[in-house]
C-alpha cells in the first residue's frame, strides 16, 4: 500500500513527507556504513586513521560490516566470530564481494569498496548460500525454483501512481519479447505477479523500506511473484538524473520473479546496483540465464 505520507509528482517522483518512527535493523547497518565516511576522503573516520580497514583491525564498525555482509550473503552467520575483530572470515567475505563487483581483490576495505557498499541497490541479497558464491554471470535461487506455466497473470495494485503503470507494463513486454512467457492482465484474485509500492515494514517481507534505505525494490522468486518498490524513493519514467528509473527497476524485479538472481555483469538487468538516472535493458547474459533455467 502506498503510504499516506508519500505522493507522486511527474517531475519529482514519489516523495516522503514523514519519517517513520523506527528503523529496521538492515537500515541501521546501511546507515552505519554511511557513517563511516563520505566520498571526499573521510573514509572510515577517526577510529581508523589510515582510512582503510584490514585483517587484524579492531573497530565497532567491523561488527556492522559483518552483519551487512551476512545480509548480502557473503559471510555465513556461523562466521561472525569476535564481533569487532577483522578476522580471516571477514577478509574472505570482502574478497568475494570485491570479486563479484569487479573491484581490486585485496580483502581490504578501501575507498572503492566503501563506495560500492554505499550504492543504491536491490534489496535482495546477492547470494542466499554464502558457501556457493563465485564470480558467476547469471545465477538462480537455491533449488532453481521456476514457473511450470508460461501464462503469468499480472496485477498492479490500484494505489500505484498512474505514471508508473505504463513503464511496468513495458517492462513485462520486454521480457515477453525474449522468452516464451506471456503476461495477461489479471484481477486481484491470485495473480502470478503482483506489483505494488510499499513503505516501512510491510507484509511478510524481511526487509522494510525507509527513506534512508539503500534498497530501492525487492521481489520474490517463483511461485510467489511479489514485486515491491520502495515508495520513499524518487522514481522517474524518463530517466531523470535524480530519480530511479521505474522501467529498469521493474525489469530487474520481474527477472527475480521469473527465477533469476543477481548477475555479476554490470550491464545486465540483473546487476544488483542501480544509480539514479541510469537505465538498463535486458542483456544477453539475462537471456542466457533464463534460457538455461527454463531450457528453451
Ligand atoms: Zn535484485
Ligand atoms: Zn516487500
Image (tube, helix red, strand yellow):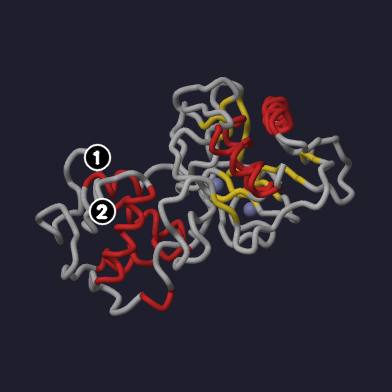
Instruction: Give yes or no for contact between labels 1 and 2 (Cβ–Cβ under 8 Å).
Output: no
List x then y, in percent, for residue 259.
66, 50
Is label 1 in a helix, a strand or a loop?
loop
**CA neighbours of label 2 inside 10 A, class few (<14), some (14 to 19), many (20+):** some
**Foreground of the two, 36 or 132:** 132
List x then y, in percent, for residue 212.
45, 47
To which quarter of the image does residue 50 belong? bottom left
Is label 2 in a helix, a strand or a loop?
loop
To which quarter of the image does residue 120 belong? top left
Disc 1 and disc 2: Cα gap in Å? 10 Å
**CA neighbours of label 1 inside 10 A, class few (<14), some (14 to 19), many (20+):** few
List x then y, in percent, for residue 110.
21, 50
Single out the residue that lies furthest toward the front.
Answer: 295
**Foreground of the two, 38 or 102:** 102
- Judge from the rendering whether residue 129 lies leftward or rightward of residue 197; answer left or right: left
Residue assigned mark 2: 36
For residue 5, which numbered disc appears in the image?
Answer: none
Disc tally is 2
Kindly identify the residue that appears in the image at 24 percent across and 40 percent down: 39
Residue assigned mark 1: 39
Single out the residue that lies furthest toward the left.
Answer: 49
Kindly identify the residue that appears in the image at 35 percent across and 57 percent down: 96
| Quadrant of the image containing the C terminus | top right
**Foreground of the two, 175 or 59:** 175
Kindly identify the residue that appears in the image at 45 percent across and 47 percent down: 214
Asked if residue 44 is positioned above or below residue 242 in the image, the reply reads below
Amino acid at each position: 500500500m502506498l503510504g499516506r505520507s508519500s505522493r507522486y509528482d511527474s517531475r519529482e517522483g514519489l516523495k516522503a513527507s514523514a519519517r517513520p518512527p523506527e528503523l529496521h535493523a538492515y537500515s541501521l547497518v546501511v546507515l552505519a556504513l554511511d557513517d563511516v565516511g563520505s566520498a571526499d576522503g573521510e573514509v572510515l573516520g577517526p577510529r581508523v586513521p589510515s582510512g582503510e580497514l584490514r585483517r587484524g583491525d579492531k573497530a565497532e564498525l567491523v561488527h556492522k560490516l559483518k552483519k551487512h555482509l551476512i545480509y548480502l550473503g557473503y559471510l555465513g552467520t556461523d562466521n561472525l566470530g569476535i564481533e569487532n575483530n577483522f578476522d580471516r572470515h571477514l577478509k574472505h567475505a570482502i574478497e568475494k564481494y570485491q570479486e563479484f563487483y569487479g573491484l581490486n581483490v585485496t580483502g581490504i576495505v578501501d575507498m572503492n569498496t566503501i563506495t560500492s557498499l554505499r550504492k543504491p541497490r536491490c534489496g535482495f541479497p546477492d547470494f542466499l548460500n554464502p558457501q556457493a558464491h563465485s564470480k558467476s554471470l547469471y545465477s538462480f535461487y537455491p533449488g532453481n525454483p521456476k514457473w511450470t506455466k508460461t501464462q503469468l497473470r499480472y496485477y498492479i495494485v490500484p494505489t500505484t501512481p498512474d505514471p508508473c503503470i505504463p513503464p511496468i507494463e513495458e517492462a513485462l513486454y520486454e521480457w515477453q519479447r525474449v522468452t516464451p512467457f506471456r503476461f495477461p492482465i489479471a484481477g486481484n484474485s491470485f495473480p502470478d505477479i503482483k506489483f505494488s509500492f510499499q513503505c516501512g515494514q510491510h507484509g511478510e517481507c524481511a526487509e522494510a523500506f525507509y527513506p534512508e534505505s539503500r534498497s530501492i525494490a525487492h521481489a520474490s522468486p517463483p511461485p510467489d511473484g511479489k514485486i515491491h518498490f520502495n515508495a520513499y524513493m524518487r522514481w522517474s519514467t524518463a530517466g531523470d538524473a535524480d530519480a530511479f528509473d521505474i522501467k529498469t527497476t521493474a525489469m530487474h524485479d520481474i527477472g527475480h520473479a521469473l527465477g533469476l538472481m543477481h548477475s555479476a555483469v554490470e550491464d545486465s538487468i540483473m546487476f544488483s546496483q542501480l544509480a539514479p538516472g541510469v537505465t538498463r535493458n535486458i542483456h544477453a547474459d539475462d537471456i542466457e540465464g533464463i534460457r538455461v533455467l527454463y531450457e528453451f
